[in-house]
Image (tube, grey):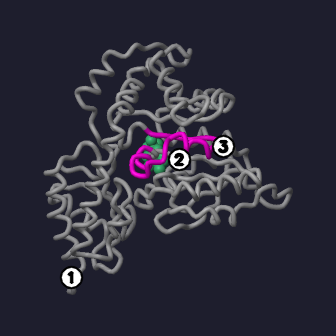
Amino acid sequence: MIDLRSDTVTQPTAQMHEAMLHAPVGDDVYGDDPTVNSLEERVASMFGHEAALFTPSGSMANQLAIRELVKPGEEIITESFAHIVRAELGAGAALSGITTRTWPATRGLLRWQDPIELARPDSGPYLVSTTAIAIENTHNFGGGTIQPIEEIAQLRRESLKLGMAMHLDGARIWNAHVESGVSFLEYGKHFDTISVCLSKGLGAPVGSLMISRKEKIASARVWRKRFGGGMRQIGILAAAGHFALDNNILRLKDDHARARSIAKAAHQVAPSTVNPDEVDTNIVVIDLAGSHKSAAEVNAELKAAGILASALGPKFLRLVTHLGLDDQHVAKVNSVLPELLDSAFKLQ
Ligand SMILES: *Cc1c(COP(=O)(O)O)cnc(C)c1O
């Protein structure tokens, strides 16, 4: 099977296993794991922040971060298809009493005016006060969209004037960086809190980090334990993270080139499904609007041909490239997918 459901499906390579095998470890709840400590310091300084906290998932890193920014009964606003509001099962409300409102954006692309027009900071005793804005970069359900740094910078200036904090859901910030050339420090300086994932395109088996100021990380460390995320000899996992940072950032460009080639092959036979120029990184969203097949049907046909993808809506199919693929896999996708799309759009 050629698995394009997500970039989370990768298997650790032999070299990554080797790095894990030799990692010095200790009890991280006591702060004793040297490999975790060095990873936390490394990632914090990559983004120009004081401290970081290793978490078992990106969802936990996001949720620990936003609860440091938003009090119960206040709101965080974000784009309508952001992971925080679509794929974390209402955790902000269920665990932290945080409410949300969203603005819509084509491909999830940020315009700094959208959140500023929606925000209602300091709303007094009548309306919910907006205390934070979350930005997803790259935007997953938007199709791996890179957020323009000028928009982020302008939003930061405007939101500071209004006293609102900013969170970056940077699960795939690595992908944004290699493609845009914008440094991690530049991305980092516009946000109060950041989450990053090692287990997506970077290929580690487990692990994310929350990044922020010392006090916020100290408080998040307490809440991580309260949420059941205090872990022990996890230097084994942090070693995979170090290995991923050392070896797997630059190669993300290959994933991006492969995603674009899949988009081009689809566009050639079914131009309305995807614009290859809008495939910024490693995620290809195929829009089946106007075809007589659903995403689930095309997904089943792909599966029968040995290719796994994700049907994320009635007409919304997602394919994600990653380090487990080679040119032969991509060649097969580029011959099978166009054929299926051609039949999905044929007049009956
Ligand atoms: C994957 C992902 C996360 C975190 O997901 P987990 O499965 O909880 O690790 C957060 N944000 C975005 C945009 C993601 O794609």
Q: Is residue 30 above or below residue 345?
A: above
Q: Which residue is mark 2?
A: 169
Query: Which portion, as a residue range, is magenta?
Result: 174-197
The residue tagged with tag 2: helix, strand or loop? Answer: strand
> Within the magenta stretch, is there residue 102?
no
x 57%, y 34%: residue: 48
User: Which amino acid lies under the numbered mark 3 shown in the image of this protein?
Assistant: Ser
- How far is disc 2 from disc 1 in space, using C-alphas? 40 Å
Residue 94 seen from this side = no
Residue shown at 36%/32% (left/top)?
244
Q: Earlier in the sequence, mark 1 or mark 3?
A: 3
Residue 255, x across and y down, in percent: 29, 49
- Nearer to me, 259 or 69: 259
Q: Which residue is mark 1?
A: 346
Residue 314 or residue 18, whichever sits in front: 18
Q: CA distance from mark 3 to mark 2?
A: 18 Å
Q: Amino acid at mark 2?
A: Asp
Name which quarter of the figure residue 241 lies in: top left
